[in-house]
Amino acid sequence: MSLSKIVLIGFPQHEDAELRVQLGKLLPDTFIESPPAETFDLQCSNDTLIFIWDSVTSPSIVRRLFDHNPQANIVVLSHNGQSERAADLMHLGAIDYRILPVPDDVLEIYIRKSGHQSALAQQASEQQSSAKNKQDVFVTEDIETRRLLDRVALIAPSCASVLVIGESGTGKERLSRYVHACSNRNDQNFIAINCAAIPEGVLEAELFGHEKGAFTGATAARPGKFELAHEGTLLLDEITEMPIHLQAKLLRVLQEGEVDRLGGRKPVKIDVRVIATSNRDITKAVQNGEFRQDLYYRLNVVTIQLPPLRDRRGDILPLAMHFLERFSQMYKRPAPQLSEQAIQHLSTHPWPGNARELENCMHRAFLMAMDSRIDVEHLALDFVPDNFNNEENNSSDAVQAGVSIRDMERALIEKTLVHVQGNRTEAAELLGISIRTLRNKLHGYESGMSLAG
Ligand SMILES: Nc1ncnc2c1ncn2[C@@H]1O[C@H](COP(=O)(O)OP(=O)(O)OP(=O)(O)O)[C@@H](O)[C@H]1O
């Protein structure tokens, strides 16, 4: 398959030739045209992709191009970007404004956006299937997220600590794995530890290890996660839930590059890149005295803010397809198609539980769709609180006969999570349960409890 055509406007000869070669490799069958810069009537369809060179481009030219070719997809390329100009052109409807050279995977996004869905989607799913470690693939087609990923790829090779902030389920762990995969530590371990899920008394030994006899039950010496992650990457998930006395010890480890096992006599040298995640506003936690400021500065060398799924809608369908493909491999049967209405539903749902909610939804739908087509009823998105946009006290909140306690509990938990914007600590407080109980319940929903009843 190919695009109906690609148009290159106003490029210097050398850039025109290079772009042609690059595009020709991705789309060998597509006609590439380089009309004179003043040509506006290009007879475009919605799978025509136009690249224009920034120095011949002004907002009025882009407007004229759109006027003549309302279905075209326009990307502006430049040698030296000017952010104001970029903002103007994007505002007019250009898909992107970018400095040359453009990597192949970004060109693929433009191509896909321009209607060239199936061939590249198939290619992408083949790439996913053949990826060495599928945990490392961070699926995204949303232009903004793609840009974020480009920036992530730039910092990944360094050993700088990274802080990933985002609502629960946005893909923080997935992004952390991507950072590791793009780093020169990728042939070493990626070790993850969830600071909220491990009982306080156990966390210290888990992180730093212990010697034999260090405490009752320590029948053998054990290395901690830091030692296991030596020369690799350690993910400290939900770092803000780490007790304050352990934060002090963590800071020392990070500063000195060595750990003291519990009951140990001499420190062990470690070389670990630390990535920490949180779904809370860490600066607030610092202000409240719950998180050490010095540790925050130490971890915060690079901060990545991962937006909620509702703010990167371009990722919804690619993620849905990715999850279906995964379940297809897991259950060894073909992935069902999504009906038009199901696609519509997925695209407009607010996804308070982000990618995790979408993953669970696709799991449910995969299992429930019998005739190899997923329809709206298979999505079972009834648990979306109607008050997601702050319209509280909606009548759907009322307790109704015929609903099981378990379903009510789940609805209440999900609604509370939405209310606190995914902050599990606050949600647990409001619900009057411990953060661990909350986590266990959420994991229970993930592992399929929600399919019953
Ligand atoms: N961009 C992505 N590509 C592929 N899978 C993704 C992506 N984002 C999220 N996922 C999947 O969605 C699920 C939730 O993602 P993840 O665990 O990384 O979220 P999180 O933000 O770390 O969640 P939490 O805050 O609850 O720990 C995982 O199964 C993950 O593999």
Image: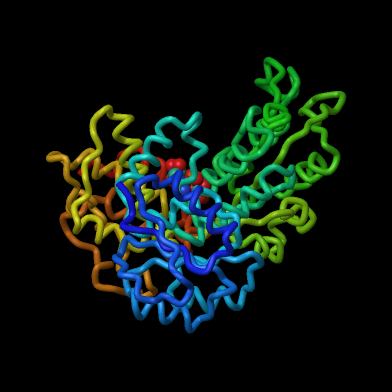
Vertical relation: 33 (above or below) 213: below
Residue sitting nearer the eye, 84 or 364: 84
| 344 relative position to 133: left or right | left
Q: Quadrant of the C terminus?
A: top left
Residue sitting nearer the eye, 143 or 334: 143
Q: Residue furthest bottom?
A: 60
Q: At 62% across and 54% down in the image, what residue appears?
A: 151
Q: Is residue 437 visible?
A: no
| 384 relative position to 190: left or right | left
Snapshot quadrant of residue 283: bottom right
Residue sitting nearer the eye, 403 or 144: 144
Vertical relation: 185 (above or below) 223: below
Q: At 18% across and 52% down in the image, what residue appears?
A: 339
The percent coordinates of residue 425 (x first, y second) are: 54, 55
Q: Is residue 306 visible?
A: yes
Snapshot quadrant of residue 415: bottom left
The percent coordinates of residue 445 (x first, y second) are: 35, 44
| 255 relative position to 448: left or right | right
Vertical relation: 58 (above or below) 404: below
Q: At 32% across and 64% down in the image, what residue appears?
A: 385
Q: At 36% across and 51% down in the image, what residue appears?
A: 30
The percent coordinates of residue 93 (x first, y second) are: 43, 74
